Amino acid sequence: MQHGAPLSTGPAAPALPSRLERSAVALDEPYPACLPVAARSPTMSGSWSCHPLRHALGDFSVEWDELNRQSFRAHPMLWSGFVNQLLKHFGNGSELLCIRRQDGKADAMLVLRRRDFGTWATFLPSQAQIAPALLPDLAAAQDLLAHLPAPAWALDLMCIDTGFTQTAGLEANPRAASRSLEHARTIAIPMTGSFESYWASRHKKLISNMRRYERRTQEEGLQPDFRVVDQAQDIDAAVLRYAELESRGWKGSTGTALSADNQQGHFYREIMREFAQLGKALVFEMWFGADLVASRLVILRNESVVFLKTTYAEAYARLAPGRILLMFVIRNLHQRYPGRRIEFYTNADQDLLSWGSESRLILHFSLYRHALIARTFSAARQIRRCFTPSLLDPSLPQAEASLEFYKRPTDFPDDVKALMAQSERQSAQFSSDWYQVLLDTVMTAEDAPGFYVLRRQGKALIVLPVRMEMDLAPRHGRLVALGNYYTALYAPVLAPEAQVTDITHLFRMILAERPEIYAMYFAPLDRDSDAYRMLGEGMRQAGLKTHPYFCFGNWFQTITISGDAFVDQLSTSLRGTVRRMRKKLLQEQGRLEVITDPADLERGLEAFASVYARSWKKPEPYPDFIPNLMRRCAQRGWLRLGLAWHGDTPIAAQLWLSSHGRADIYKVAYDEEYKRFAPGSVLTAEVMKHVIDIDQVKEVDYLIGDDPYKKRWLSQRRERWGWVAYNPKTWPGLKLHVRDRLATWLRPWLARLQQAWQRLRKAPEDAATQTTNLPDNA
């Protein structure tokens, strides 16, 4: 059989064997050419085909690398050379390359292997930190099971990097039969500034520890000698030195270390040689005299610098040679490759998290052919747990976790305040100031607002801002995100080391404390965030029945150009309107200003209220919220209050919040009597230039809704979603869960019935029209 030939053999293919015969194919045997035919997916716009591999990607390497370049920024661990070495050393010849094409072009590719009877999985040797799967969007894999050799009931997508693969589309689809599992939290360092600025932003404890290690090294009379091996002819010898060092440690005693003559030793030597020939391999070493005490293997392509492996001499563990070398490596890479990203690909503990500037999750996903199969697998897991006590409860022991409740941010202890301060870097709406204004001006005692805090071994990991909505029957209530229609974005506050099991334990403790809760509502959430996924999975593992739902569209723009350039790239009509009307306004005693100073705020508040009262806007139901928010934001330096004046009369006002590289457009209004000046558009351009050129923001956000005017200014759109979770142990929760499940199942059938009914109604009308239009001589 020709290498790389598709599993469909065309019109001349022999008759397909029966399902029983196909099921009898040995799991490690090459698949017969007649095993499945690629078919057009009924639910996706692309079609899948499957091709057997023989220890290499073969002719598909070029297409693989092109997709890697387009969608994964030429990731080094997804380069065809890396994948080919994995297949060569660890493949068994039974792997399949699955390709989804749209309009003749591949938009998804992944390597699979049969895992057991009925289950397929991504090909994933332990030497691969992420799976060889080019899936820009995980939703593309939903219909792959229908095109795999039978039996194909489940597909396990292992080690999916959420930094490159979008998962929200699959997780938000209520009809998708899938589950996710957290594998690891990895870290990264974007080298966008100097090493000195990076190091200055590290935690004080890390900096103190490194000083102590260096001082201890000097006290023992040892001088680190750092070496960087970057020449192709020297790389192999450096890898052999690495293998020898690793073999002397605990990995050598367990048989998992590299060595010159074992399989993974051959793999790493060949990988490093291939990258070295391209000038893309580095080996960093640290020596004490004649002793090699630490070594790190590094590969790179395009923007990613990947730490492949690291080891150190355990005899020098007291001096932390691995950490000393790591600091040198990061400093050296900042000098060599400014603007790129260091990727660790590790399951970071608390110590390693302090080194990273960013963290993200590596996830496992299981997809099932049908919802019934998903439930069968779930039941099997439950039965297994019954006979395996260690699997009964993946969450924390009660003794390690505690739940606290605070009514106001002013009550927070210092560590919770620090966690909130860290969270506000993502959005001003995650800050203690935002919640304090909301509590002072919107919430009442009947809302029972507050903040649940989960601690693990005394450390604050999660802050969940909530309120309670009680039914008329006092025995039942709903736990709701702390917010209302002012809230454009919500999320639980998560420490970097927080895991899904922590969220699971949080909800179990809340339900134990408040058994009357029959439903929980959390929205609006960023569907692409870790918080969205972890919140949904944590509630599911806590025994709640979750349903995702769409909230609203959100228009935004990533900023990479100057303010003038931004205006120049607007549509011709909008750009022309802004320039003409700005000139006209200024010629007729008009002026524009952006208030940021708290000293000018009261004057600005008066002008804002005047414009708002004369605009088309409805009066605010909570009139104190916006003024208090402006005062609080002015104190923090976040306020950007734009005003357009005609003489001494304010004719347009806009409230923007600018913090941590992000500008949110919160309120806009203008006096329609002065519509001839297009004051709203002129003022938007003025404040836009301010936040881009002066504040240097990286993103501008129009917050809530798909209003037509927003897409005239900002070109990117994303969606905000929410979770509703029902407690099946309560009658209202069980009833609502069944209702929503039935609605999800019936909706497509009802839509088809409606379409059929409309066709039936239209048929007599069409016949009558044809009769009426007959020629006179018919």
Image: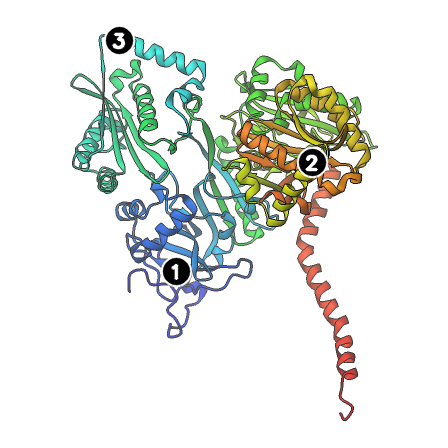
Relative side of 756 to 493, left or right? right
Disc 3 versus disc 1: nearer the observer: 3
Please provide percent x and percent y for residue 736: 73, 43
The residue tagged 1 is: 24
Mark-to-mark CA distance, 3 and 1: 67 Å
Amino acid, disc 2: Gln
Sequence order check, earlier mark of 3 and 1: 1
Q: In this figure, which residue is indicated by the disc labeled 3?
A: 218
Of 476 and 393, the residue lying toward us: 476
Which residue is the extreme one toward the top?
A: 219
The residue under label 2 is 587
State the CA–CA distance, disc 1 to disc 2: 85 Å
Looking at the image, can residue 443 be seen? Answer: no
- Under mark 1, the amino acid is Ala
Q: Residue at x 69, y 36 (%)?
A: 587
Q: Position of residue 564 (x, y in %)?
A: 55, 37
- Foreground of the two, 646 or 720: 646
The part of the image, by quadrant, that contains residue 537 is top right
**Disc 3 or 2, which lies upstream in sequence?**
3
Percent position of residue 381, x then y: 52, 41
Question: Label 1's element?
Answer: loop
Say whether residue 576 is visible: yes
Say left or right for 154 vs 278: right
Q: Amino acid at mark 3?
A: Gln
Q: Are marks 1 and 2 in contact (CB under 8 Å)?
A: no
- Residue drawn where x is 65% and y is 43% of the image: 580
